[in-house]
Amino acid sequence: MRTIRLPEPPTPPVGMPEIFERGVYSVVRRAVVIGNGFAGAENQCVGLVRALGLSERQSLYRVIRPRGGINEWLWWLPVSLHKRLDFAIRWIFAGSRFSVVFRGQKPFSFLNGGTTGLSSILEADARQIATMARETFEKEGPLLVVASGWDTISVASSIRRLAPHNVFVVQIQHPRRNLSRFDLVVTPQHDYYSLTPSGQQEVPQFLKRWITPREPPSRNVVLTVGALHQADSVALRVAAARWHDEMAPLPKPLLIVNIGGPTHHVKYGTDLAKQLTAKLQNVLASCGSVRISFSRRTPFKVSSVISKEIGHHPKVYIWDGEEPNPHMGHLAWADAFVITADSVSMLSEACGTGKPVYVIGSERCKWKFSAFHKVLRERGVVREFTGKEDISDSWSYPPLNDTLEAASRVREALAERGWTLHH
């Protein structure tokens, strides 16, 4: 029998790096998160990276503003201008008695706090990150950049401008203009409320040219119902195991109460706190246990009313704010939730569990937040908290899967560029 000799594969051009021969240059195996120091924004970025399977190969950078003194009033300035102004103020008033008023704290570095896969947090520098992406492209492949928050927009868009062939940039939360600066924009559908008939009626004619967005979502926009987050099924199973010894013995049903804080579009104070405590007292008979958590935004006057009115009850436990934070354990072990209407993030996480979610204060929501709550009610994922509920009567719904759906769109967009994710 004659041996059949297969033809040799074509020889690659001289000088072509070995990585191109293997095609590894098209595999995305690392990610950079650009944060702004706010947990709500950074949690969305890390959640998306986690859903894409890159949580073990991510680095977190932060856009860091000067802090303290007059700097707390300059948050609306572009970060670069804010830093230059801070430098000038320091130079002019150095050593004077006015320096106490004007001085801000110097930028600082952070540790990752134990978040899986995160390296030490560095200050975001668009030119440095873009240079790293270009110089390591042949060895490491493309770089996924995920950013969220107003302060990150200029950094993320600059990275794409400086290294367009080496990065894929996802901006979470609507950047308001020039969406073509990003490969993908992930934003809640209620950000387009100004274009709806209801939104148009609420906007005075002289303000319409200033309200954004002014155009329907383009092809590179991914619309979600709520916020992205890290509380997927795997994370909840891990949390359930971690908090088993503390949560499992609690009498059932376990009602988790998450309280945020007033915002420009959802205003409340002690009046809502008193309504909440009165309604909670009405449902205590049908609860085995109640655990209450306040956020960093919760005003002291609100938390003090709730603690005074209901904190002494034997069924009620109020988290004192000390580590470890039981939030993930609450999501895993809760039988039902009561959440204030102001927090899109807390509602999105709870609505991702498929468990009953009751909302208090939604009638106070204005503008796009009213549209957000309308969508949640129409999908059957939330109900208004009336104080007449029997918490032992459970109900369910198809959980929100915004993070997984956004990750799927990222994969599709990467495939259109001939790139794929590392498995």
Image (spheres, grey):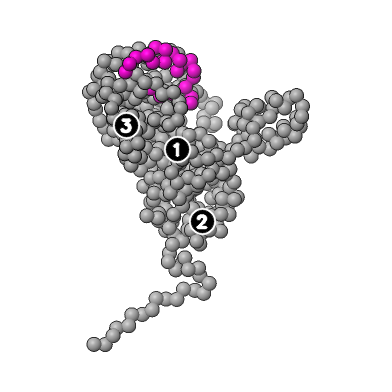
Q: Mark 2 or 1, which is nearer the eye?
A: 1
Q: Total of numbered circles in the picture?
A: 3
**Can you give x and y, in whole percent of width and height, for residue 214 in the image?**
49, 35
Rendered residue at 26%/32% (across/down): 397
Rendered residue at 35%/43% (across/down): 404
Q: State whether residue 84 is above or below residue 316.
A: below
**Can you give x and y, in whole percent of width and height, for residue 77 in the image?**
62, 33
- Residue, disc 1: 43
CA gap, disc 2 to disc 1? 25 Å
Answer yes or no: do the residues labelled 3 and 2 have beta carbons within 8 Å?
no
Q: Mark 1 or 3, which is nearer the eye?
A: 3
- In the image, the segment drawn in magenta is 292-315
What amino acid is at disc 1? Answer: Asn
Say whether disc 2 or disc 1 marks the residue closer to the N-terminus.
1
Rendered residue at 38%/79% (across/down): 8
**Can you give x and y, in whole percent of width and height, for residue 76 in the image?**
59, 31
What amino acid is at disc 3? Answer: Asp
* Label placed on residue 166: 2
**Regarding mark 1 in the picture, which secondary structure is present there?**
helix
Classify mark 1: residues with Cα within 10 Å, few (<14), some (14-19) or many (20+): some
Say whether residue 336 is left or right of residue 268.
left
**Regarding mark 3 in the picture, which secondary structure is present there?**
helix
- Residue, disc 3: 245
CA gap, disc 1 to disc 3? 26 Å
